[in-house]
Amino acid sequence: MGYDHSRIKSNARLFYKNNMGNSIVSILIFFGMAMAIGIALRIFITIVSFIFVLFMRAAAYSAAGTTAVSLMLSIVSIAAGLLMAAAEFPLIIGLFGWYRSSIYRQTTLGEILSPYKPAHLWSNIGTGVLISVFTYLWMLLFIIPGIIKSLSYSQALYIKGENPNIPASRAIELSKIMMDGHKWDIFYLNLSFIGWNILSSFTFGILGIVYVFPYYYAARAFAYEEIKADAAARGVIDIREINPNFYSGEVYPQ
């Protein structure tokens, strides 16, 4: 079949047309949950910061105490930021998984939150953390290698969504294998939505919620399926490792 940019975007538009309501709600769930996680962690930061300030004031009024308070508040803020990013990884996996699954069958919106199930929660968080750490380390070298590596890792969360039991390191490794020869394809696909995102900014994000984001995530899901199918056709992956139920009748829409 091969990767086809035009077919992917055409399929994504058709997907949106046939799943408009649920697509919009999926984005609202995603941003609503992300906002709730952010608010919860900000409350946590405020409470912990207040406790630290009271503790240090009770200890002594001194330059050393002030420095200690500032240091602890900085540590708490950084830790909370990392925790917020980590807490959102299962949400991202859920959103990716919903779009991918909906290509083949009617999928309930509740599936977006399924990666938070205790059985797979820490593995999902670990996958996101590993991707972030690896990408950051490459970014420390130069921006371009960092971008290239982020593209290499870009399918790992889709793989985790499709097979929650696969180890984080293996999901990343499979993504790197699948993306060999397809980095430019995903980069170009992302680039093709810049105009839409700029236009969305003029509507205060409303256009993004009701059209651009659902269209984009649908396109990414179709791209994932084509990249996976191409890697399987080349014999570099076994689809059954990613999808143990591959022979259950799923047929990619042409």
Image (cartoon, rainbow, N blue to C red):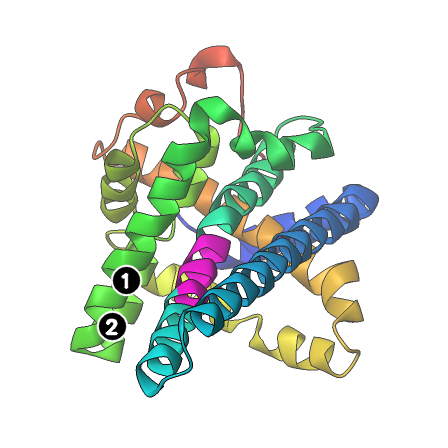
Picture layout, residue 245 above or below residue 117: above
Region of the chain picked out in magenta, as a range: 76-85
Picture layout, residue 61 above or below residue 114: below
Residue in the foreground of this view, choosing between 211 and 73? 73
Q: Does residue 17 appear to the left or right of 196 in the view shown?
A: right
Label 2 and label 1: CA atoms lie apart by 6 Å
Q: Quadrant of the C terminus?
A: top right
Please tell me which residue is depicted at 65% across the width and 81% down the height of the picture. 198
Picture layout, residue 241 above or below residue 188: above
Checking the image for residue 112, the label placed there is none
Regarding residue 228, the answer to whether it shows in the image is yes
Furthest residue in direction left, as rendered:
141
User: At which x and y percent is residue 79?
Assistant: 40, 60
Residue in the foreground of this view, choosing between 221 and 70? 70
Magenta highlight on residue 125: no
Q: Quadrant of the N terminus?
A: top left
Please tell me which residue is depicted at 47% across the width and 59% down the height of the picture. 80
- Estimate how packed mark 2 is, as few (under 14), some (14 to 19) or many (20 or more) residues with alpha carbons within 10 Å: some
User: Where on the picture, by quarter, is residue 145?
Assistant: bottom left
Regarding residue 182, the answer to whether it shows in the image is no
- Estimate how packed mark 1 is, as few (under 14), some (14 to 19) or many (20 or more) residues with alpha carbons within 10 Å: many
Picture layout, residue 88 above or below residue 122: below
Furthest residue in direction right, as rendered:
21
Checking the image for residue 139, the label placed there is 2
Quickly name the residue at label 1. Answer: 135
User: Where on the picture, by quarter, is residue 76?
Assistant: bottom left
Q: Are marks 2 and 1 in contact (CB under 8 Å)?
A: yes
Residue in the foreground of this view, choosing between 34 and 166? 34
Please tell me which residue is depicted at 67% across the width and 49% down the height of the picture. 33
Residue type marked 1? Thr
Residue type marked 2? Met
